[in-house]
Amino acid sequence: AEARASPRVLPQAALDLPKLERADMHVLYRAARIQGPSMPLDDLTLRMDVVDGAVSLRPLTFGVGRGRITIGASLAPEAEGAVRAQTEVRLERLDMSRLMRASGGYRGEGALNGAARLEGSGRSVAEILGGADGAASLWMAGGDLSKLLVDLAGLRLGSALLSSLDRDARARVECFVADLALRRGVLSTRALLLETEDAVTEGEGAVDLGRERVEVRLRTESKRLTLGALPAPLLVSGTLKEPDAAPDPA
């Protein structure tokens, strides 16, 4: 109930690493299957060392269809209860159909790849992310996405109306690339591009992890004549917990 009432999404609870100074540990944990109606993860393997209160994951891996998520991280205690965090993440051939099913009604196919790194310090996850530095990149070649989702992102209302009559209609993905920079807790776009068989969507904007605010503009150019398209970017703005999407008033 407290989490639902809070306007924040990122965990504010203090990380209490001093308790880990009481023992040195080597932990190996395997879960052969993860169950849940909307859970995209299949299995996990965790290797963790705790030495003098410092924690290292070497690594934590999740299975997603034929792909994997690999996370390597270290957490080291600092003065005044702060924690220094360093994290590297690799995404290898993540099954988009599993991710899209977990997110809701839209569908998609393909293999998503990516890499990310992050470094920051703070007394909670929210503080660490709110002042962190790093970078992230995602890419996918081939596959497909829900045509209704692509039409709505491009404000192609005439096409979206037709796509809504066939919720299973797909748009073939030619290319997807996202290159993001993280500087003092602000995640900004260096490149954001989605090209499908009939449209090209480019994005620019930023997500402020400290304030938990987002402002991203998506502009779509159709490759062929499209009826009922608004000549304006789609503006995604607001809080991380309750973002809004609407035509850019400007």
Image (cartoon, helix red, strand yellow):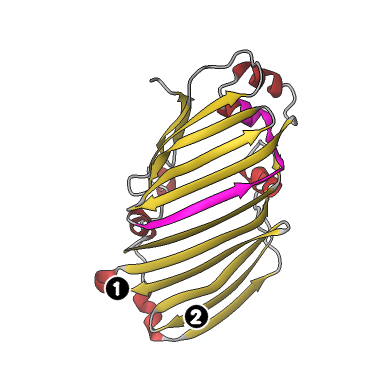
Secondary element type, mark 2: strand
- Where residue 4 appears, as percent x and y from the top left, is 44, 45
Residue ID at (70%, 46%): 110
Circle number at residue 222: none
Of pointers 2 and 1, the one earlier in the residue sequence = 2
| 47 falls in the magenta region | no
Residue type at mark 2? Answer: Asp
Please state which of residues 56 and 13 is positioned toward the viewer in this rendering.
56
- Where residue 103 appears, as percent x and y from the top left, is 61, 43
Residue occupied by mark 1: 78
| 134 falls in the magenta region | yes
Looking at the rendering, the stretch of residues picked out in magenta corresponds to: 132-151
Residue ID at (38%, 80%): 53
Rendered view: 61 above or below 130: below
Rendered view: 47 above or below 124: below
Image side of residue 231 versus residue 194, left or right: left
Q: Residues within 10 Å of mark 2 (few under 14, many from 20)?
A: some
Circle number at residue 49: 2
Image-quadrant location for residue 172: top right
**Badge 2 vs badge 1, beta-carbon distance below 8 Å:** no
Q: Residues within 10 Å of mark 1 (few under 14, many from 20)?
A: some
